[in-house]
Amino acid sequence: MNLIFNESLLDDFIDNKLDELINDEVFYITIFSRAKYLSHQEVEFYFKNTKYRNTIKLNSKAIKSKKSFKQDLIELISNARLKPIKGNYDYTYPIESLVCFISVNKKSMRKALMRFEAEINLKFYNLTSSVISNNNNAISENYKQIKNLDYSLDNFIGSKKSNSNDSPNIDIDFDVKHTSDNRLGLRIYKEFKRNLKDANVKFYAINTAGGYHVVINSNGLKSNNKINFANWVKKFKKYTRENEKEIVINTIQMIPIPGVYQGGFKVTFDEEV
C-alpha cells in the first residue's frame, strides 16, 4: 500500500491550490502515526512504554519549491516508513496509521532562524547569569535546558510564529460526516461554502477522515458585503457548544493532503457547492 493513492489529485493540489513561494518561503509537511487508526492490540505494541500517548511524529520537511514538492514528499514518506519501533528496525509503523499534514500557510525560514537564535541566546544568557551569581541550582537547571534543547529548526519552522508575511489562509475544520445525527452540521457546511462562492471568496474544500476542511483566502473577506464572516464564526461556536461534533477555526493550521491516505482514508477534494 502506497501512502499516495492518486497522483492526479496530488498534482492538482500542488499546481492549483498551493501558493507560489518567494525568497525564504517554504512549504512545511509533517508525517505522524496516530493511535486512533489502530486496533487496541496495535496501540499496545506501538505506543506502550513510549512518551507518546496517541500521536508520534515520524518525519517533517521544509519544501523549497513546487517543482520538487512531489519528489520531496515521496522521500519523506519513505523515510517515515523506515523509522524503527523503539529502536528495532524489524518493525515499522503501519501505513494504515500514517497521516500526512501540510501547513495551510507558507513558512519563513528567516523568521524560524531568528526565533531559533533567540531561544539559544536566551538559554545561554540564563546559564551565564546563574554562573555569575554562583547559584548551583539554577546552573544545574539551565544546563539541563541547554542539553535538552532541540537543536534543529524543525519546531520553529512548524510554529505559526514562523508564518510568512504573506499568510492569508484560514482553515475551518468541520467535524461532521454523512450521518443522520449530523444533518445540521452538514447543512451549515454546505451553506457556508455556497456563501463563499456567491461572495467570490477564493477557497477550496477537502473531504477527510473526520469531516471536511475549508481553506479560505482571507483577503477575499475584507470589505466584502456579500459575506459576514463574524456571523459565521458565531454560528460555528453555537453549533460546537450544542453538539458533540465541532466546527472550529483550525488554530494548528495543518490539513491532510488530497491524493494521500489519512489513516487509510482517501483524502479528496469536495467540489460540490
Image (cartoon, helix red, strand yellow):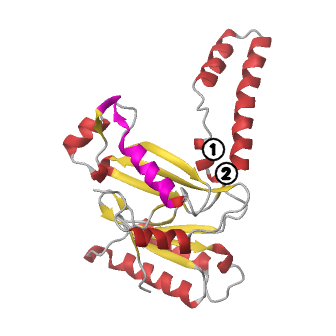
What residue do we see at 73% from left, 36% from top? Answer: 117
Q: Is residue 16 above or below residue 96?
A: below
From the image, which quarter does the N terminus lie in? bottom left
Whether the residues at callouts 2 and 1 have beta carbons within 8 Å, the answer is yes
Query: Does residue 81 belong to the magenta stretch?
Result: yes
**Residue 254 x/y as whole percent:** 51, 58
**Lower sequence index among marks 2 and 1:** 1
Read off the residue under disc 1: 156
**What residue lies at 58% left-to-right and 51% top-to-bottom?**
62
In the rendered structure, which segment of residues is drawn in magenta? 70-89
Q: Is residue 85 above or below residue 267?
A: above
The rendered magenta stretch, by its main secondary structure, is classed as helix
Q: How many marks?
A: 2
Is residue 254 visible from the viewing direction of this image? no
Mark number for residue 161? 2
In which image quadrant can residue 22 be found?
bottom right
Q: Is residue 109 magenta?
A: no
Q: Please name the residue shown 36% across and 68% down the image.
A: 6
Up/down of 74 relative to 209, above or below: above
